[in-house]
Image (spheres, rainbow, N blue to C red):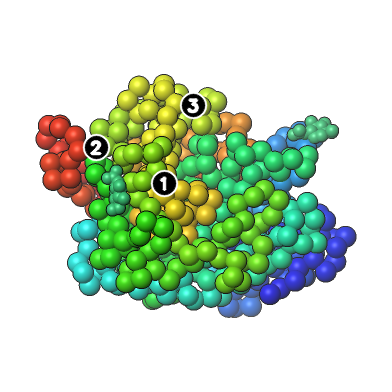
Amino acid sequence: MILLCTFLTLCLSAVHSQFPRACTTDEAIRRKSCCPAWKDGSPCGSLSGRGQCRNWVVFVPFAAGKVPQYDDDRLDWPHHYYDKTCECKGNYSGFNCGDCRYGYHGEKCDRKKTVVRREIRELSLLERKRVFSYLALAKTTKSKDFVVLTTGDRHHRDTYRFVDATIYNVFAWIHYYSMKPIMMNSSFDWSRSYAHQGPAFPGWHRLGLLFLERQIQLLTSDEDFALPYYDWRGEKNCSICTNDFMGDNDVQAILNPYSYFASWSSICSGYNYDDAYCPVVENEYQMEMLRRKPGTDPLADRLPSFQDVEDTLKWRDFDRPPYNSRARRSFRNALEGFLRASDGLTLELNMHNLVHIYLGGTMSQVPISSNDPMFVLHHCYIDKIFELWIAKYNGTPNTYPDNNQLGQGPNECSTPYFPCYRHKDLLRKSTDFGYTYSIYEKSQMSQGQEQQEEPQPEPQQEV
Ligand SMILES: *[C@@H]1O[C@H](CO)[C@@H](O)[C@H](O)[C@H]1NC(C)=O
Ligand SMILES: *[C@@H]1O[C@H](CO)[C@@H](O)[C@H](O)[C@H]1NC(C)=O
Ligand SMILES: *[C@@H]1O[C@H](CO)[C@@H](O)[C@H](O)[C@H]1NC(C)=O
């Protein structure tokens, strides 16, 4: 465990988060510099032309002098922690420009590759077992590149620490960290988040999935690895909640001991309160086991239908004022699930949110829901719908709206990723990021709770 703020005074202005391990040394924190050396020994691989260490790579959202009185460490990411970060050239990327932009591979990052994410039921038994064993490996292998932030008390910077976490737990933590209520003037606002309730929602989750997918590709040396998705349209109940797939559960929500994820515990569980970031994360005693209880919450008595997805895709505006959970006629708000997709007006639980609540247990505690690999499958399907929308309306970075949600401006860096990804740059075709989705012909008749006409074939995607 790396104890951070030994220099308390310095740390008051420079404390910490997905944090590259190399940027969490006392020295890096003190200098507010996150420009680790690449293997040629130079910061950001500058001697090899991969990138350079730059001041203010970040995009300052507020005009000088207008910075509001927020004391939240994640605002204007990653400015609170670092003034200097790597700016990578060409196809290079990563916190030290040692990796490639998503979609590129090879030492020189000059090989373009597109992987295909498929519905979990499209995989052969062997393929499915491989996915599950990769996930198990990510769950148990300590991340060599990243550490996570814990605090005893968000008001006291001297309690901030970086600790080791496994690769999957880093991913789970990233979501948890981004969702913590925003601290302003020492009080908390739960109605805002850096990843939800605003236009950043689809892109933020896209980036999280890319992070996990890439980490698994690196871990397993399997460059073709693609995350699977779960197309839940029109299901009567969670049909993949069986031991062959994501696991059966008992009435207590405990996963069946013979299922693949039965031994998984949840990072940051039991810490769903405002004042701390996930204290003592790797202490087994503080982590509860995964829980799931599909179809038992009276608030969510169904999964979204085929028609809900069609209706969501009919909203041409990516997002609309007030750019939060009350936005009407907004594709993003319909997809996120605060809106009835058919009329675009009625605020109700639907789509993304409905699936979380329907699945129950860990998935229904949204801040820690990323601990359940079901989160990955669910969000890949949400991302597929995002992708269908982009294709239908020719979405580009310019489509991303200017807005007043904290930390969700078009030019702000998505929290807490390294290097900086501006929100608007995530609104691009998935092939730009090196992946695409299978066309999954799901019959409404076989699953169907609804009497409807023919199944609608999905629009063909570019490959
Ligand atoms: C925080 O407090 C200061 C001084 O009391 C006040 O001017 C400012 O508007 C407050 N900011 C917020 C976001 O409430
Ligand atoms: C990035 O990769 C593409 C595709 O392989 C290649 O054509 C291009 O030259 C690369 N760009 C740079 C700057 O290396
Ligand atoms: C879904 O399945 C679970 C467990 O098999 C059951 O307890 C629940 O009642 C079902 N819910 C619905 C809505 O069918």
Give, as a three-letter code, the residue at label 1.
His
Q: Is mark 2 within 8 Å of ligand 3?
A: no
Secondary structure beneath disc 1? Answer: helix
Nearer the observer, 287 or 411: 287
Position of residue 353 measured from the top left corner of the image (x, y, whole percent): 43, 41
| Residue at mark 2 to residue at mark 3: CA–CA distance | 23 Å
- The reply to whether discs 2 and 3 touch (Cβ–Cβ < 8 Å) is no
Q: Is mark 3 within 8 Å of ligand 1?
A: no
Position of residue 122 measured from the top left corner of the image (x, y, whole percent): 20, 59
- The reply to whether discs 2 and 1 touch (Cβ–Cβ < 8 Å) is no
Judged from this view, the residue extending furthest toward the front is 251
Position of residue 254 measured from the top left corner of the image (x, y, whole percent): 41, 62
Secondary structure beneath disc 3? Answer: loop
Name which of mark 2 and mark 3 comes first in the sequence. 2
Secondary structure beneath disc 2? Answer: helix
**Number of numbered tags placed on the structure image:** 3
> Measuring 17% from the left and 37% from the top, which residue is drawn there?
456
Residue 63 vs residue 217: left or right? Answer: right
Give, as a three-letter code, the residue at label 2.
Phe
Judged from this view, the residue extending furthest toward the right is 9
> Measuring 43% from the left and 65% from the top, which residue is drawn there?
214
Q: Which mark is residue 356?
A: 1
Q: In which quarter of the image is residue 435?
A: bottom left
* Residue that mark 3 sits on: 327
Q: Quadrant of residue 282?
A: bottom right
Give the label, 2 or 3, closer to the camera: 2
* Residue that mark 2 sits on: 306
Judged from this view, the residue extending furthest toward the bottom is 40
